[in-house]
Image (spheres, rainbow, N blue to C red):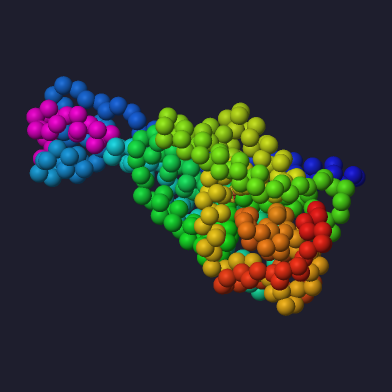
Amino acid sequence: MNRAVKTLGYFAGLVGLAAALSLFFSGLWGGKAEKGGMELFEVSPGMTARQFARGNGVPEAALAELLGAKGAAGLDEPLSSYKVDEGKFFAELFKRKALWDEEGSKNWRKIALKFALWFVFLGVVFALMRAGRITFGLRNVLYLSAVAVFGVLLGADPSPMGTVKDAIALYGAKHLLFKPRFVALAVFLLLTVLANKFICSWGCQLGALQDFIFRLNGGPDRRPGLLRQFKPSFAFTNTVRALFFGVFTVVALGWGFDLIGPVDPFKFYNPSEVTLAGWGLIGAVLLGSLFVYRPWCHLFCPFGLVGWLAEKASVFKIKVNYDTCVACEACAGACPSTVMGAILKRGRTVPDCFACGECIAVCPTRSISLAAGRRALPPPGKFSGLGLQKP
Ligand code: SF4
Ligand code: SF4
């Protein structure tokens, strides 16, 4: 059978199976729906503070604090008898309720499990990469495992992207800062500062899926004739990504609207929540991944942009030993993006390196490693005149 047809067949099988299993597992986790938190409170004449608390899902201790009552025991007076400024009271209650709803919408046990598994999985991959043990086959197994565990089994939330997107969207819509989300963002950024975009490469459920699909369209031999792949310029992809981030932020803060929400591609792992437009975008991103490396990450993902900036301070990064390097440029050709080309060309702007380790695997003189410390510049002229980044 024609290789292109085979590739498309594998692609359709993988996407269909992942979506079907995600539908099953997202149901198993109980599918706690995100609540709006904007409901009005129900108040009836003569209602006591305790009745108000119970009827509106407000914790009694918190209500007592807001009303200036003597603990939960002091809530048996009619609500109207407490000496508080009604406007301020409801404004504060409204804010707190939105945070309680946000907290109540999360499955905290699942989130704790996901972070624990992330640490273990990323630790194992990091050790394998440092030892130069990630082969083509193992890389695919690892990406598939990340898709299966962090996406299909454990769902769309949390994700690196969500920590940035949802924080901006929530602030824009309700003027709220949800602290646990900032803790998660700090963890993801710390991981990025430790080892490039390791969390994006190996941990993000959508990133790993795009990566696997990209590699589905390029066998270990990378023979041409499958389906042609492209390496768009970083100037183009990063400009689109920065502009999109700007528009998303302005719309979220100015109009309280989450532009990504209705078409969020992470919802692929929670198919029952995907809209028709969402399926359109997911289809485009996944199909596009056959031809371009991680289109969502490079063109739209808010964490993609933030992580790229954080990556500049990475402790561990891809480094080349120019003493043993024979300037064959196999690494630049094998790099799915334009990163290795920029490194060898002494480019001032180095694109997102997803620490995939492909360059390490193909180097014939073992001159590339994921190592700590500053990245040395290549000797001037060492790579000039050669055909960098030929696909
Ligand atoms: S850049 Fe890609 S891998 Fe990183 S959070 Fe966004 S979608 Fe995931
Ligand atoms: S192949 Fe490219 S993206 Fe992958 S680790 Fe090497 S430089 Fe980074």
Quarter of the image with the N terminus in it:
top right
- Residue displayed at 56% across by 49% down: 304
Give the total of numbered labels: 0
Q: Residue at x 66, y 74 (%)?
A: 131
Is residue 115 visible in the rendered image? The answer is no
259 left or right of 335 in image: left
Q: Residue furthest right?
A: 1
Q: In the image, 327: left or right of 111?
A: right
Residue 316 relative to residue 98: left or right: right
Find the magenta span and give its range.
73-94
| Position above or below: 242 against 334 | above
Q: Position of residue 42 (x, y in %)?
A: 25, 26
Instruction: Say if 106 sits above or below 325 in the image.
Output: above
How far across and down, in percent of the image, does residue 343 sit? 68, 62
Let me know if residue 232 appears in the view: yes
The percent coordinates of residue 214 (x first, y second) are 73, 50
Identify the main secondary structure in magenta: helix
Residue 256, x across and y down, in percent: 42, 32
Image-quadrant location for residue 139: bottom right
The residue sitting at 69% across, 74% down in the picture is 321
Left or right of 64? Residue 192 is: right
Nearer the observer, 116 or 379: 379
As drawn, the residue found furthest toward the bottom would be 323
**Residue depicted at x 52% and y 63%:** 313
Is residue 308 located in the magenta-colored stretch of the structure?
A: no
Extreme residue in the top direction: 45
The answer to which of 284 and 313 lies nearer the viewer is 313
